[in-house]
Image (tube, rainbow, N blue to C red):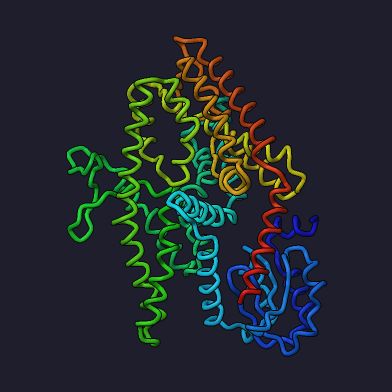
Amino acid sequence: MEGMNKMSKSKDYSALATEIIAGVGGPENINKVIHCISRLRFYLKDEKIAQTEKITALDGVAGALYNAGLGQYQVVIGPAVTDVYDEVIKQLGAGFADEEATESAVAETGAAQQKEPRPTNLWGWISKGFQVLIGTITGSMIPIIGLLAASGILKGFLTLFTFNLNWIDTKSTTYIIINAMGDSAFYFLPILVGFSAAKQLRSDPIVVGAIAGVLVHPTIAALWAAPTKGMATFLGIPMNAEFFGLPIHIPQYTYSIFPIIFAAWLARPVGNWLKKVLPLSLRSILQPLFTLFIVASAVLVIMGPVISLISSGLAAGINMLVTANEAVAGLVIGGLYQVLVIFGLHWMVVPIVSNDIAMTGHSVLNALINFTMIAQGTGALAVWAKSKRADIKGLSLAGALSGYAGVTEPAMYGINLKYGHVFWMANIGGAVGGLIAGLFKIDMFGFTGSLIGFPSFFSKTNPNNIWAFVIASAATIIVSFICVYFWGYSDADLAKVKAAQKKNVFKDATNK
């Protein structure tokens, strides 16, 4: 287990690749290597030379077997198979690879996996679709979680040193430079996620990264930030741009991940189709050109407006709920708001909060949202306290610190959504904290939330407001921690996942 922790921590698969190559008999016993979505597949000159027991015992390998029907010696890796495959080919040489056979194997096993656990009802399909979506999101985020956690902590300290302690002037160039350091990973998050998602979804990472660059380009961001007064609207959404005469809405794409994951998914079939129809002599130029234009257009024309419409409706409903009953609003928002964050549907709530603070100097809505950040940070903290795995403890502690600094993405995507029921158990604490805060009629006099935003709860007219924050925060932390610690996470869950994966993959390989 210790070896596996080191490998997960460093993401260096060179040693594992070397041991696997040696285990199958070395380069002299290998004809070709391909892979599917979970296994390395070796075409060997003599399969009897392969040392199955030795390979199976390797950390990072779930099993190994020879499939006589396919004439392949298969090594079960799991989600990291592409990384291990790349390292194997790097050590063997490009002549051992077969890209077409690999694409075919990935397509076959992907279809087989979709057919095997076939849902029997609508809820089953919805549940399966949600699991696949969350798996894709977390898989795309994992490579950059450490960077996001570090950036979140830096942003938290900057907030502490400026708005809380007044050690740094917000108008100084020192503040501007440090703020850029902390904000860079989040502002350009679509580019980072796009590159990572493209690798996971097997589309072109460079093209998807360029598409993400379109979404965060300064001129596109300026369209969203420009005044919308007097513009035509559709269901309350201002049509702030047009594309070949078609009115569209450009939303906030910085800090978002869902639109670019959609782009990474769409780029593969579009790119593959172009690869088939374009002449070979022009493919290297026209394929990325048309892929970028088609996919970026689809995101801007379809995904942006759809997400804006949905989030606008949700924002209006949330605002009405807060106005009608603050306690009930606290319960609902505390329990469900971070679900909106996952899909980028929270961006229409941000203008409401900004307008409240600009017009009145305070925001009840932002006060209630605050406890969802504390809950997710505490969920990661409970995992840190319970886990005995060094890699999990490091990731969860960084996520907790970032969550308490007001940035929940590292906690959610790195730990809470990925393992067990951490996310939902933490949300129970958020719901309890939100309910208590609503009962106390809490208010907030600033934008910075979570624990580091405590100065925003000092009120000149209501001295009890800060105590409402303290009590609700304590309740959020206690309930979230207990729920996650006892019912949300166990290291044993990870072992069960590996065992189930091993069993299912062996079954799949044998059936073929």
Q: Is residue 101 above or below residue 262?
A: below
The residue nearer to you, when weighing 48 against 372, is 48
Give the number of callouts. Answer: 0
Residue 250: % across, % down? 30, 49
Residue 171: % across, % down? 46, 34
User: Residue drawn 59% across and 56% down?
Assistant: 143
For this orientation, the residue located farthest to the front is 120
Would you say 383 lies left or right of 365 here? right
Would you say 417 lies left or right of 258 here? right
The residue nearer to you, when weighing 122 against 438, is 122
Q: Quadrant of residue 151?
A: top right
The residue nearer to you, when weighing 231 against 493, is 493
Q: Is residue 434 above or below residue 55?
A: above
Would you say 214 lies left or right of 376 here? left
Residue 289: % across, % down? 36, 72
Position of the C terminus, as image quadrant, is bottom right
Would you say 346 lies left or right of 498 here? left
The residue nearer to you, when weighing 256 against 21, is 21
User: Residue drawn 82% across and 72% down?
Assistant: 54
Position of the N terminus, as image quadrant, is bottom right
Q: Is residue 32 above or below residue 376?
A: below
Residue 248: % across, % down? 24, 52
User: Residue drawn 56% across and 14% down?
Assistant: 467
User: Residue drawn 32% across and 56% down?
Assistant: 300
